[in-house]
Image: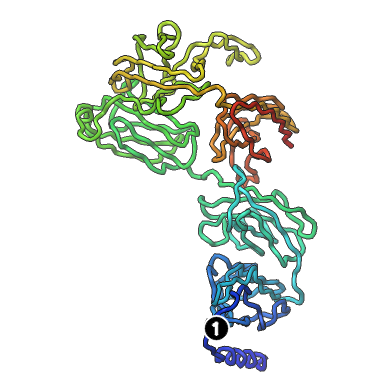
Amino acid sequence: MHFFRNRYTLILVLLLSACAQIVAPGGGLKDATPPKVKKYIPDSASTNIKPKSIFIVFDEYISLKDLHNQLIISPPLSKAPDINVKDKTLLINFSKDDTLKSNTTYVFSFGNSIQDNNENNPKEDFKYVFSTGNFIDSLTIKGKVENAFDHKTEKGILVMLYRNYDDSTIYKYTPDYFTKTKEDGTFKITNVRDGKYKVIALKDANANYKYDSEDEKIAFIDTLVNVPSYANLILELFQESPKKFKLTKYLYNSYGRVDFYFNKGSDSITIKPINYVFNDGDIICDYSANKDSLTYWFRNVDKDSLHLQLSNGDKILDTIKLKLITKEEALGHKRSPLKFKVMSSPDKNMSFDLGAPLNIVFSSPIKTYTNGNINLKEDSSLIAKQKSFVYFFSDSGQIATVGKWDSTKVEEDPFYPGVMIKMPKKVFYNKWKPNTNYHLFIPPSTFTDFFGLTNDTINIDFKTREETYYGSLKMQINIAGTEQNYIIQLLDEKENVIRRNNIQTSETIVYEHLSPAKYKLKIIYDTNKNYKWDSGNLFQKKQPEKTIYNSELINIRANWDLDLKWDVK
């Protein structure tokens, strides 16, 4: 053993003493050849060794680039080895405190981090392999990791194999094998021993190979994977809903309004004033669609501060103290005086879409409106007055929408399942004519807001598009499987939801007045029938709800009707 140790030392000394001056060539072809290995010490693919150092000698001077992100050592070592370059030699020195496992094949994957000094030509996908046992494991496992919700892929996601697995392994122990995904989400783990493994993918926030942060994403295969016999694996990455509900932040930037933000949604949020008793109607709690934020409106407080206690169910989250100003001080503020005003509405400089609702968003909740001389003109002709046809309603708090009552609506009686009754509903007005100018006039003091303020005169001008500008999509969706709730989404190329439908089985859906563009189709398997996509849970062995995209982008052209058949398998 001393003979080999002295022999390695002598070779290293000779290698490091052989210095040569690098001289740039005077001309000729550019060097496009990556560095080549001349010698390994010990040899790559050696067995029955536990080296303290590894020397890899190349045929030219080399350097390391982005080693921290590209180097993968599988199985992982308890302490990172010291890796350096000296001229043409790559030196790997193991930590004195690190003990290599017995009967284990180790793979050092350098990616493209090793390159020559002259032209930075990388030695692509370079690997060094050795075994502490009497053979080199040679099996391979490969697949793809993608985001469960939108199927997007990401470089650098850990894919880990565990030989001995229980429910606590991923939280406590490092894997037996691992690799990282490429940009397209694909992965390949080589030199794996045959057997059954638990396969986990992890977006590791703190680089410790363990699932121990709420910021991390996880994916898992439901069953153990037998490495000698498997197909390409698909792992669906998701972020679990936080276990502990908490307030993440609040904003108190305007009079009578506080915005609260939480780390997840809840139906049990309550806000209790603890130094003041409000009268009925002096508080409005406006929840977001996902119940993960709310706007708290309040008025008529005759104190200089307000203390609010936030709770989720019977658990107190926080107590905040707000320094108040009077309504008169808010009205007289120099920079941003309190005023009831329109925040957004149709813009005469932008074309208004046929079939769209006419929405007006105000700065604060609408409490009442009057049947005044509101009118809507088509070009110069008066087509509707509030008293006769068009009116405003404000079920959405700060949004007023032109609409009407639909007394022909038939729905199931909420108190008598199976019994259908007429349910009059407010529906938005959308009988717009193409290529037409419209003018909406709202006189002052038509609307009164939560704080008792009224609007100034409102004039809104807009023009609709030509009918020939739009295309339409008639889509027959054939769903194989049991009847359940499916969410159908028509998305633009940036994944914004343009249209949405809920269906229970195969159905034909028609989308009219679509702007010329490319669209995506997506279906969400809403297994718990809550009309939204739900993430998974590792401990409960619950996969995220499945999503499927139509395989091709849909090209909607102007003045064109497209028929599409989508067989969802």
Q: List x then y, in percent, for residue 265.
A: 49, 37
Q: List x then y, in percent, for residue 400.
A: 41, 20
Depth check, front residue: 489 or 564 = 564
Count neighbours of disc 1 (C-alpha within 10 A) and say few if under 14, some if 14 to 19, many if 20 or more: some
Quadrant including the C terminus = top right
Q: Quadrant of residue 33?
A: bottom right
| Residue holding disc 1 | 87
Depth check, front residue: 480 or 382 = 382
Q: Is residue 96 visible?
A: no
Quadrant including the N terminus = bottom right
Depth check, front residue: 417 or 192 = 192
Judge whether 284 appears above or below 493 on screen: above
Residue in the image at 43% along x and 36% along y: 293
Residue in the image at 65% along x and 78% along y: 36
Secondary structure of the residue carrying numbered label 1: loop
Colouring rule applied to residues:
rainbow
Horizontally, is 147 left or right of 284 in the view?
right
Q: Residue furthest top?
A: 388
Q: Quadrant of residue 481?
A: top right
Q: List x then y, in percent, for residue 432.
A: 50, 17
Horizontally, is 486 left or right of 215 in the view?
right
Judge whether 139 appears above or below 462 on screen: below
Q: Residue furthest right?
A: 229
Q: Is residue 298 visible?
A: yes
Residue in the image at 36% along x and 40% along y: 250
Three-letter amino acid code at disc 1? Asp
Judge whether 111 appears above or below 433 on screen: below
